Amino acid sequence: MPQTKPVVSIENVVASASVNQTVNLNLITQTFPDVEYHPDQFPGLVFRLKAPKTATLIFSSGKMVCTGAKSEDQAIKAVKTVVMRLKKGGIPIDNEPIIEIQNIVASASLGGKIHLELAARILPRSMYEPEQFPGLIHRMLDPKTVILLFASGKLVCTGAKKEDDVYKTVNNLHVLLEEKGLMMYD
């Protein structure tokens, strides 16, 4: 019996940002003792937030990468919070951050089993090599995403830049699998 809608969960939103100026990472380390900075191993500094639970890499170029957010809004809020805290801590930052969502990773359950070998033959832009990896890799053109699809009916969607694209991708794939008779329900 077909399930009405797949259950989708956003796992990680990656955002890049820039304040368009250089930033003194040593000064940040002195001001915020809980940041992680090991310039001999990696050129960026890690600034963690508890809410939203994220890690933001800050580079001396003023570029930043925020990971760990569970929504676009959380990612944007996290970057703005980091910049605000830096300013409050006396770190000279003149510009507001320019923030761009780079990647959204989501998981979903389609509510039924999938015949992966048959799906690999029927779905265009799909690759299935069970000796290498237990999931089918499907590249969707619109929205431009990559889906890792498992026989259990669970999947991982990556490459989306908007949350809406995640839902569209999962829905489009679900409809396609239904239409092609590739879904099996208990």
Image (cartoon, rainbow, N blue to C red):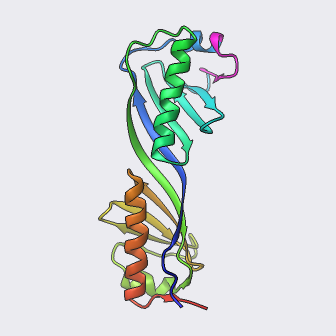
Q: Could you tell me residue 38's position as x and y percent?
A: 64, 22
**Quadrant housing the N terminus:** bottom right
Is 75 displayed left or right of 35 in the figure?
left
As rendered, which of 80 and 57 lies closer to the eye? 80
Rendered view: 169 above or below 181: above
Give yes or no for residue 70 being in the magenta stretch: no
Query: Which image quadrant is residue 40 in?
Result: top right
Q: Tell which residue pokes out farthest to the right in this image.
A: 34
Give yes or no for residue 33 being in the magenta stretch: yes
**Quadrant housing the C terminus:** bottom right
Dominant secondary-structure state across the stretch colored magenta: loop
As rendered, which of 142 and 52 lies closer to the eye? 52
As rendered, which of 42 and 167 lies closer to the eye? 167
Q: Residue at x 51, y 75 (%)?
A: 129
Q: Could you tell me residue 32's position as x and y percent?
A: 65, 16
- From which residue to which does the magenta span run? 30-39
Rendered view: 144 above or below 176: above
Q: Could you tell me residue 30's position as x and y percent?
A: 65, 10
Is 97 displayed left or right of 82 in the figure?
left
Q: Residue at x 42, y 86 (%)?
A: 178
Q: Residue at x 62, y 31 (%)?
A: 49
